[in-house]
Image (cartoon, rainbow, N blue to C red):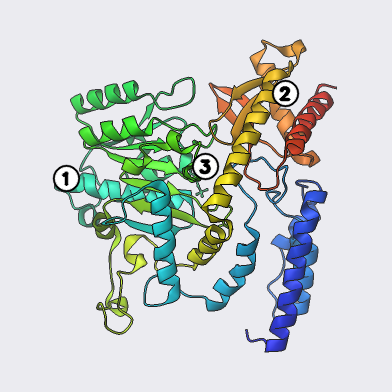
Amino acid sequence: MRLTEAEFRTLGYRAVDMAAKYFVEVPRGPVFQRMHASERQALMNMPMPVAPLSGDEILRLIGEQILPHAMGNGHPRFFGWVNSPPAMLAVITEIVAAAMNPSCAGGDHAAIYLEHCVIRWLMNLVGFPIEGSAGLLVSGGSAASLTALAAARHRALGQLGIDVRKQGVGNHARLRLYASAEVHSCIQKAVELLGLGSDSIRWIEVDEDFRMSLDHLRRAVREDREQGWHPFCVVASAGSVQTGAIDPLDALAGFAAESNLWMHVDGAYGAAAMLDPHSRPLLEGMERADSIALDPHKWLSVPVECGCVLVRDGALLRDTFSLVPAYVRTEPGKGIGNLPWFAEYGMQQTRGFRALKLWVTLANAGTLGLGQQMARQIALARYLAERVDAAPDFELRSKGPLSIVCFRYVPEEIAGNEEAVDALNKKVMEQMQAAGKAFVTSATLAGRFALRACILHYDTTEADIDAMLQAVEDAARRVME
Ligand SMILES: Cc1ncc(COP(=O)(O)O)c(C=O)c1O
């Protein structure tokens, strides 16, 4: 476990050299390459060493067997899912976080105050009230929404006279949660984990821009009340995972308030667009939510993992989770006692020093730098949508409003044959992923398969977009041959 200072420096510099070389080489190589079966086996079946391996040996193994097989999201032509490259300065400072190795459960040390600082920054960013609210860094968007919905459930059952922490969910209430079919799957997962069962979700229709229909929501809530359900929560997307659609947040907030519904906003992908002055108006109303899930490890490029949950009623969030065993109980102003422990606001006790990489990333880019980067990426998405729209063999399926574009390749020979178009595009995606020129993933829109490009890389240019479209055509030609 212990290295001498000289060893630490030598090995540390070597690790930095490896990462620096990686950053230089990634854009020059294929976006992604499948590993050979033997390479996978070598990693999975590695025996646990009995005799110690030296630092030299371990770095050599990392360089040979691990570093060459990255996921691909470091490459400027990676357009898959919602995975960004890491902010480079935060990569460097991770060594400091690991060296300090605090548990951010709570206590009186710098990591705690830095977390309070970045939470306040994020609250400011989304216009959330600071007084009385609470926030917590978590592993990602899924954990953020789970935490928020636990608070929503706690409030809803409390209003029905049920102490869910004591009595459990049982058959006490037919709680109903509303979300559009475009909402991320983590919401259903959270509902299931919270013991409500996925039947308690009522799926709300979307309009032609994939935004939740307020009319349908109103109707659904009315019907459910008549049928003995207890509507308790509406989940709105601020940047849905498939298309980046933003639900009508302000109108939903108004409806939620008048209907005693908890409004949770899943802004894991899109809330960060608040940094772009042109996109900010699209997110109006988000600040009225009861809770927001944000994901700095997505568009803000904070190295994975870093999610964040914000809850307007901080005391309620504490009530939902707080359980302070005697061995971690402190009194304000005494010993290590100071602010309430973060561990009281979520399910983790030992918590990593996520705040450092978030703070480094935000401070190093500044709100100005981040806003400009987002504006550039949204402009690239517009460029892609225009190119797709103008090309006879391409069909635009969704074009924003953020940095996601969905489209299909529809050559004249199979136009109108939906099954054939689906099958072709699926094969095109698979070919592209394996070929390594550009990486796209998929979306299912109105029941049909579409290629989906999400632009999150700080180095992506129009030339990369052109290359991606060329890769689609090349793959389609190969498939059709
Ligand atoms: C809109 C949205 N919500 C939630 C999530 C889940 O976030 P995480 O993967 O960080 O748990 C994602 C992930 O892509 C997402 O795009």
Numbered label attached to residue 141? none
Nearer mark to the viewer, of 3 and 2: 3
Measure the C-alpha gap from mark 2 to mark 1.
Answer: 52 Å
Q: Residue at x 30, y 35 (%)?
A: 253
- The residue lying toward the viewer, choosing from 458 and 413, is 458
Q: Quadrant location of the N terminus?
A: bottom right
Q: Quadrant location of the C terminus?
A: top right
Measure the C-alpha gap from mark 1 to mark 3.
Answer: 39 Å
Q: Which residue is mark 1?
A: 159
Q: Which residue is mark 2?
A: 424
Is residue 247 shown left or right of residue 361? left
Residue 261, given in percent of the width and then of the height, sits at 25, 37
Measure the C-alpha gap from mark 3 to mark 2.
Answer: 36 Å
Is residue 297 shown left or right of residue 281? right
Look at label 1 and name its amino acid. Gln
Q: Residue at x 42, y 31 (%)?
A: 247
Look at label 2 and name its amino acid. Leu
Q: Residue at x 73, y 13 (%)?
A: 414
Q: Is 146 rendered above or below residue 199?
A: below
Look at label 3 and name its amino acid. Asp
Q: Is 94 rendered above or below residue 376?
A: below
Is residue 187 shown left or right of residue 320? right
Residue 38, given in percent of the width and then of the height, sits at 80, 56
What kind of element bears circle 1? helix
Q: Quadrant of residue 260?
A: top left
Residue 284, given in percent of the width and then of the height, sits at 39, 36
Q: Is 364 rendered above or below residue 481?
A: below
Tag 1 near tag 3, CB within 8 Å: no
Q: Which residue is mark 3?
A: 276
Nearer mark to the viewer, of 1 and 3: 3
